[in-house]
Image (cartoon, helix red, strand yellow):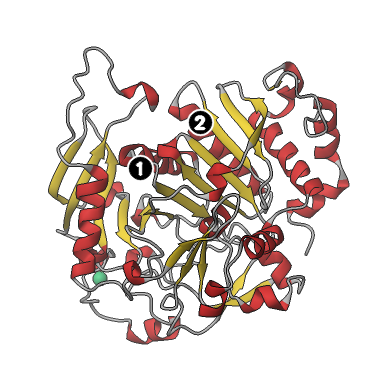
Amino acid sequence: MLRIKRVPTVVSNYQKEEGEEAARRGGGCGRNCLNKCCIQGAKLPLYAYKRVNKVETEKGVPGHENRKPPVAFLDSLLLGEWEDRMQRGLFRYDVTACETKVIPGEYGFIAQLNEGRHLKKRPTEFRVDKVLQPFDGNKFNFTKVGQEEVLFQFEASEDGEVQFFPNAPVDVENSPSVVAINVSPIEYGHVLLIPRILDCLPQRIDRDSFLLALYMAVEAGNPYFRLGYNSLGAFATINHLHFQAYYLAVPFPIEKAPTKKIITSNGGVKISELLNYPVRGLVFEGGNSMQDLSNTVSDACICLQDSNIAYNVLISDCGKRIFLLPQCYAEKQALGEVSPELLDTQVNPAVWEISGHMVLKRKKDYEEASDENAWRLLAEVSLSEERFQEVNALIFEVIAGGDKINGGVIENSHGEADVNTKSAEDVDAITKAPALLWCLGLKSA
Ligand SMILES: [Zn+2]
């Protein structure tokens, strides 16, 4: 079993040390949480989004007089409620006072000095060799947060139009999806999207939950508001299904990296490979419908987690571009393969760091932050080229629908028959190769 020690991030004010939690149990909880003890009769704002077929075609469709939403999702609701919680002193520190700078260099990596984030917590052991672990109701999970940390419920509209109810009852039977603050924000508007919170789903992507996250990016409609996902083993700290999101008005380095198209799926989703970026990854965009894009990405994620490969996801550009990044940093760390200098920084390369927003804990590291240091850290996060190609082969086989890969379901892009474009035969050979035992979870057995 592989484990690493790290200081867990406190995402809720109700996230106590586990011992404390157990000691206080018994009788009503009296903290207005989301559990059975307090949820009956609770009311929270409800934003019901409109299901759309395609992001781009939404504006200017004849017959649809762009009916104005009853509330501006990002500016009024999300950021407005977030600021309200800041006024009420619910955050552990003032993130707007944290120093941030863009590091000179080709992509402009962003460095933030955040000394407050990891204070007051003891390091905890995290198991990093299992991407899927069962939900454990005894550990901290989001049903334990106070209702004041929840900003609103986020659901699909029943009647096809955006709707907003400032005071909607919480329908316990239907397990609402909610948006809550992260009390240890790394940027303005840092929130958590928790799909079907009362169902207590473990941290694992499924098609419906990913589509919900994509809808949140669409609804925000601002390229500076991005969502991210960390799997277990890739620096998620809480095993209760959640996405993160925040607002930061600069382009992320990963968004500026060039890409090379590899294939187009049957549903019209273009899949490319990142080029000239320290972490190898895939970029998904397009698709005949939003559902096609969402399903293709979630199927790729499901393939990775079922193969016990840790990964991060960034939903970018209002839901139009999605980055998928398998990683191996925590595993290397557990095996003692990461240099002491990198470990000393205590930087956890989760989705934001991988995307180029480096959250640094020590003033020294902030002052010495450079393009070179960012690349050096992120290079340790990336899979090797060989391994990355093996993982891609697994993903493409799943997306093509198993054995149908030779039946033209996935087409190779023209004019790019170079080293990185594998033939169907290669793909077949790789997926059957014994080297893949590594990623099927048998490596450390
Ligand atoms: Zn309670």
Q: In this view, does 335 lie to the left or right of 346?
A: right
Query: Does any portion of residue 1 appear in the rendered image?
Result: no
Q: Which of 40 and 108 is in front in this view?
A: 108
Quadrant observed for ligand 1 in the rendered image: bottom left
- Quick check: marks 1 and 2 in contact, CB under 8 Å? no
Q: x, y percentage for residue 289? A: 45, 24
Pick out the residue farthest to the front: 104
- Dot 1 or dot 2: first in sequence order is 1
Pick out the residue farthest to the top: 62
Identified by mark 2, the residue type is Leu
Which quadrant holds residue 336?
A: bottom right
Which quadrant holds residue 241?
A: bottom left
Q: x, y percentage for residue 118? A: 46, 78
Q: Nearer the viewer, residue 16 or 420?
A: 420
At 33% from the left and 71% from the top, the residue drawn is 97
Query: Does any portion of residue 238 appear in the rendered image?
Result: yes
Q: Which of 297 and 62 is in front in this view?
A: 62
The quadrant the C terminus occupies is bottom right
Q: x, y percentage for residue 71? A: 17, 41
Disc marking residue 293 = 2
The quadrant the N terminus occupies is bottom right
Q: Is residue 297 above or below residue 356?
A: above
Q: x, y percentage for residue 406? A: 77, 20
Which quadrant holds residue 261?
A: top right
Q: Is residue 229 left or right of residue 91?
A: right
At 38% from the left and 75% from the top, the residue drawn is 15
Disc 1 marks which residue? 216
At 36% from the left and 50% from the top, the residue drawn is 196
Callout 1: CB less than 8 Å from ligand 1 = no
Dot 2 lies on which element? helix
